[in-house]
Every structure is written in structure tokens, then in C-alpha cells.
Image: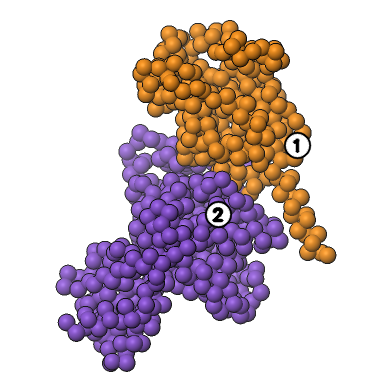
Chain colours: A purple, B orange
Amino acid sequence: MSTRLTTARPGTHFWQGNVACAEGALAAGCRFFAGYPITPANEISEWMSLRMPYLEGVCIQLEDEIASMGAVIGASWGGLKSMTATSGPGFSLMQENIGLAIMTETPCVVVDVQRVGPSTGQATKCAQGDIMQARWGTHGDHEIIALAPNSVQEMFDLTIKAFNLSEQYRMPVIILSDEIVSHLRERIDLPEHIEIAERREILQPPYFTSGNEFPKGMPPLGRGLAVSVTGSSHDSTGIRATSDPEIHRKLVEGLTSKIRRDRDKLADFEMTKVEDCSIGVISFGCTSRAVYDAIEIVAERGINVGHLRLRTIWPFPEEQVRELAEATSKVLVPEMNLGQLSLEVERVAPENTKIIPVNKIGGGLMFTPEEISSAMLQNVAR
Amino acid sequence: MRCLSHNFHFARNYLREEVLPSPFCSGCGCGTLANCFLKAIEETGHEDLKQFVFCSGIGCSSWIPSPHFKADTIHVTHGRSIPVALGIKLARPDLKVVVFGGDGDLVGIGLNHLIQAARRNLDVTVIMANNMIYGMTGGQIAPTTPLGVKTSTTPFGSFEYPLDVSRLVVASGASYVARWTTFHAMQLKEAIREGLAKEGLSFIEVITQCPAIFGRRLGMEDGRRMLHWFRENSVHISKAKDMDDKVLAGKIVVGEFVNVEKHGLLRNIDEMKKKVTRTEQA
């Protein structure tokens, strides 16, 4: 990690979430952006198109999200930190090349500003329905990193973190924002210096993961290394090997274990008041903002709520969820979908935990604090 | 180390020895295309492929560079080689980026990217091996398959018209477009040389033989018979201009379709950036 001056003026700003995301990317060293117009992510590409020419970077609008994701992979191999931003329909189109980025171990950042689906749904309205798509949208066995900001500040901070993780683990990292957090305008404080993981060059194989062998950086193009990059199964030098069971097994083991073994290190969360609480809540993104208010409402009645707010959605912070579940035995999982994160909570919580999904298909309406507080009260009373 | 011995085929200077022999079927045109490309490289004085990045999608001809060329090669998803090449070129304008792909890859699943790259005049050379069929997957109909031809998914004959790809790329705005067949090895090599030197998008369509999957359905299971067919049916573009469509039906129009001086995407981006810095200074 190295320290770098932020590209934007340090100090206090009043920004929109999408702008904070774009500025976070630029601060992290992103110098290539490709995207396709889609609501509610447009402000990210618009902001990038204004800023990139001043920073010797490139921002280009391409013919679709498939091309955008492809170009991001190409630019990353060309040595530039790269990003694209989209929403559900575009995220669907990107899935194939997200798989390519995972397979070719290409660092890049994909922002998914979640909106109401399925299909075109409600383009301007908020939802949290892409949790499982972020995890399993692309085919085959793989792991992914997905971060969920809940404020304008975190749109900046977590975008920087996403770039750092993408370089460290050499893989795509997903920012799971949502329409509310992305379009929110609020105060943000920019530091003078930030911690950055710079691109590391390696000049000899292994260039790719195999088993427990994990490359320490990325081989640069144009230096006579004859780097072979392929989405087909390959060995640690990158040469295609599609009929060798052992090479494929070691490849997939490597691609998944590099994340699995660091699950705890990757878990970014906020855990509050876990001792002596009558009920626990697990939340993320815009929903967590209603949860904060709901906790205050029930506190007036003397009810203590343990709150685990996830910044890392994938890999799923299993230990932390288990800890909360053990402390509270009743866990409320509010989310703006029909129950995606709650399935994961069910998977890892001890058997005697009562898991209470609180689902809202808002059709554009966010959770109110009262909806969550009344769910808390109902379940504490029982 | 470059080897100049007479017993040593020149192309081996540019190939990964460890992956040879190639997996191409007997009689396939991919070898001829690789040979023509590497000859063009040698003749332009490149001792190695250090200055090149090759990008390819899915299909037999996508395997020409990956893994055979001793170069940086990026082998991507089906139809998406052009967007990836765009990303590479914009990040590394100092490198020559060359796309290899088949007709299924570049104008079946990936057609939009080709049109848009030609519209942008992206500074990349695209070489399309057109064998008129999906060869790797077993002979399904392609957007280039002639009307009436039986394929594994049109067992009673194709009921669609084939796409004239070169004319489409000309209309989309590329700097350079040429079409030759694998029979025209010398002309093909010259077209590749010309295309590599152009600013903007150069597109070279190579009508190539797939005797194993396509030819045998036409009674031409021998690659040589297909080459003969190419020779008999090719018409140079200078002659084709004065021929009407009925006479040209079933013919292969070859030659240089367009060759113009036109700013490429990179230069246009640079111009925009200059404007930005001028505004900043003012």
C-alpha cells in the first residue's frame, strides 16, 4: 500500500453518491472508464467524462454494457486501473465478461446501482434485488467480492477500497450501491491522503493462480514476456489446457481459495450493542439508514438492538453473522427484496436462531423506520 | 534469438514452439492466414512480436494467435475481442493491437462491436477469417453462409441471405477494407501490410476454406478443391464495379474496398484533450 494525494480538493463537500463514487475511483488511480447510459448510474459516467481529460485518463461511452466490461478488462491488462458502472439490466449483460475477469484474474471495479427489477422494472426506483446476481450472476464455480455503501462518504471510501482489493486479489470487485445511496446528496469529508494499492508488475511466471500458488502482481504487455491470457482453462503460465483435469481443478481451487481463506480479513462491517440486546438486525445499503432510526425508536421503550451492518456482502461475513446470532437468538433481516441476504443468514446462523426476514417490494418506496421498528417490537414481544 | 538458417521456416521466429503442431484440421485455411500474416510482419522488419498485442474471441481462427504466436495474446469471450482490443489500445497507444476472429465471432455474435469500431475508426487491425460456417461447434449456419446451403442447423438448406461484411465495414467508416481469399496468398499478405500501417480501423476479410466441416457439405472435402473454387469464383473489385448483381451472384469480390486517410479514434481523443487543456490554461 502506498499513500497518495486525493485528486479532489480535501475538506468538506456536499456531493451526490454517484459523484463521490467517481471521485473515489479517480483518487484510487482509476484512469479508464467505459460505460453505457443507464439510470440510476448515469452521473458516474458523466462525472468521469468531465474529469478524465484533466487527469490523462480515458472515459468512453460504448455500444453496450458487454463492450464496456470487455474494454475495462482490456484497459486493465494495458496497465490502467479501470471501472464501469451500471444498474440491474446492464449488470445482467456484464455477467459473461465479469466471469472472464475472474478467470483471467483482471483487476477492475464494477458499480451496480441497484434499481427495481426484474427486467426494466422501475428504472428510477430503489431496490436491493441484485445480491444473489452479484454472487452467482456469472456461470461456474467462483468467488466474488462485493461491497455495499450506505452513505455518500462510503461511496467514496468503499470505491477506493474496491480498487485496492481488486489489485490485491487480482479480480473484479463489485460495488453494490442502490438508487437511494447513489442519488443521495449529503456531506462528505475528503482526507488529504489515502491508502492505495498500486499495480504491481511481475516479469516471470507464475502469471496466474494455480492451487496455492498466487501471483504477486500482473505481467505487463509490450515487454516481450509473451503473456498468454485466456478465458479457457489454463496453467499458471496462462497457456490454454482444456483437457487436463488436474490443471482445471487447481485453477478453480486457486481462484476460490484466494478469497475463502481471507473471508475474515475481507469482512468489513459495523457491529453495535451486541451485549444484552433483545433482538439483532442485519442490514446493508439504504435499508441500514432506516434501521438506525428504528433502533432509536425502540430504544425509547427500553429495547436494546444489536445491529450488524454489512459493508462486505461477498464473501459473506459468516463469523460476524454467527456472533450476532449467538448473542441475540432472534435476527431480523430487512431488505428491499423477497429475501436474498436472509438465506445466507439462515445458512450460517446456529440452528436455534430465529431468523425473521423483513421484505419489502417497495415499488419505489423505501423502508420507513416505523416498518422496521414495529417488526422489532412484534418479535421482541413474542 | 532470431534464426536465419535456410532449414528453419521464418515463421518459427514468431511461434511458440511448445504448442506446435497446431490443432487445425487437415486442409484448413488458418495455416495459410497465419503464414501470410507472419510474412507481412517479417517483411515490415519486425524481428519479434514485442510491439504487438493480439486479441481474439472464440472460434478456430481465434486460435491463430492464441496460443501460437510468441506474443502477448488475450483470448476472450465469444464476439468480444473488439471491445477488449479497444481497452488495450486506449491504455497502450504505443502497441499495435490486432484482432483475429472468424465470421461467427465478429459478425455473428459480435457484429455490433465491429460496426461501432469502424464508426469510431478505432486504431486496430481486424482480420476476419470467413469460412462461411460455425466450424468449431460442428457446422451450424453462420451469417455468411450462402443461401440454400445445408448446414447442421439448416438440414434442408439455408433460407437466409448472407452478409457482405466488407461492404458493411466500408459503410461504417473504416480507413481500410480489403477482401482476399486464401488462394490469393500474396495479395492477402500485401493487404495485411497495408492494413497494419493505416491510421484508424483496418479490416481484412479472408475467405478461407474449412474442408472438414463446410467443404464436405458442398462436395469439396479436400482443401485444394475449395482453393480451386475460390480461384474460379473470385472477381476483382475493379471488374465487379461494371458487372450487375445477377452475374455476380455466387462470386467472391476481392480487392481493396476502401483505402483512405482519416483520423483514427486515438487522434480524435488527443484533439479533445488538447482542447480541454487549452480551456484550462485560458
Q: Are marks 2 and 1 on the same chain?
A: no
> What type is the residue that disc 1 sits on?
Lys
Q: Is residue B64 above or below residue B186?
A: below
Chain under numbered label 2? A
Foreground pick, B101 / B279 = B279
What residue sits right under mark 1 in the picture? B262
> Can the viewer see residue B135?
no
Q: Position of residue A337 (x, y in %)?
A: 33, 64
> What type is the residue that disc 2 sits on?
Pro
Mark 1 element type:
loop
Task: State which quarter of the image contains the C terminus of chain B.
Answer: bottom right
Q: Position of residue B117 (x, y in %)?
A: 62, 39
Circle 1 Cα neighbour tier, 10 Å, few/some/many (<14 / 14–19 / ≥20): some
Image point 46% across, 70% down: which residue? A180
Q: Quadrant of residue A334?
A: bottom left
Q: How many marks?
A: 2
Q: Position of residue B188 (x, y in %)?
A: 64, 20
What residue sits right under mark 2 in the picture? A37
